[in-house]
Amino acid sequence: MERLISANKLRKAVEFHVTSVSVCGTVAEARGMTRFKEICLEDIDNAPTIAAIPVEWLEEHDSEGNEFGRRYITVVEALSMWQKEQANGTED
């Protein structure tokens, strides 16, 4: 099963993994762990992106105050609204 994750949060977590000699047995082990961490960060950066509208955004915009003036909107309408906000730089 696919899982949508925050690659930015994962990247930050991996960046802070300690790989110094203070936690590794030898300098060679520390270098190896540092290289492994670099590979993981590259993999995160190169992972495919899945377009998704955050659930929080959908919940905030599922109200009578949406631009269509009704409680429920279609997926296409929601996508259009979300893309406009992203283009205008109003995302969180």
Image (tube, rainbow, N blue to C red):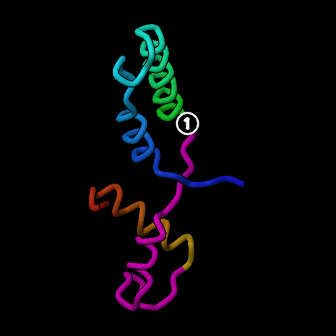
Q: Nearer the viewer, residue 84 or 35?
A: 35
Q: Is residue 18 left or right of residue 76?
A: left
State the residue at coordinates (48%, 63%). 53
Looking at the rendered image, the quarter that the C terminus falls into is bottom left
The structure residue drawn at horizontal position 46% and vertical position 8%, both measured from the top left corner, is: 28
Q: Is residue 47 above or below residue 66?
A: above
In the shown orientation, is residue 15 left or right of residue 58? Answer: left
Q: In the displayed orientation, state which residue is furthest to the right.
A: 1
Task: Please provide percent x and percent y for residue 69.
Answer: 40, 90
Dividing the picture into quadrants, the one containing residue 90 is bottom left
Q: Residue at x 35, y 57 (%)?
A: 86
Q: Which residue is disc 1 drawn over?
A: 47
The foreground one among 40 and 7 is: 40
Q: From the image, which quarter does the N terminus lie in?
A: bottom right
Residue 58: % across, % down = 46, 74
Q: What secondary structure characterizes most of the magenta part?
A: loop
Mark 1 is on which residue type? Ala
Rendering quarter of residue 24: top left
Magenta stretch? 47-73
For the residue carrying disc 1, how many other residues have a C-alpha within 10 Å: few (<14), some (14-19), or many (20+)?
A: few
Residue 44 in percent (x, y) is at 50, 35
- Image position of 45 with respect to 24: above or below: below
Q: Is residue 63 magenta?
A: yes
Q: Is residue 84 left or right of residue 45?
A: left
> What secondary structure is found at the residue carrying circle 1?
loop
Front residue (pair 84, 28): 28
In this view, the residue farthest toward the front is 25
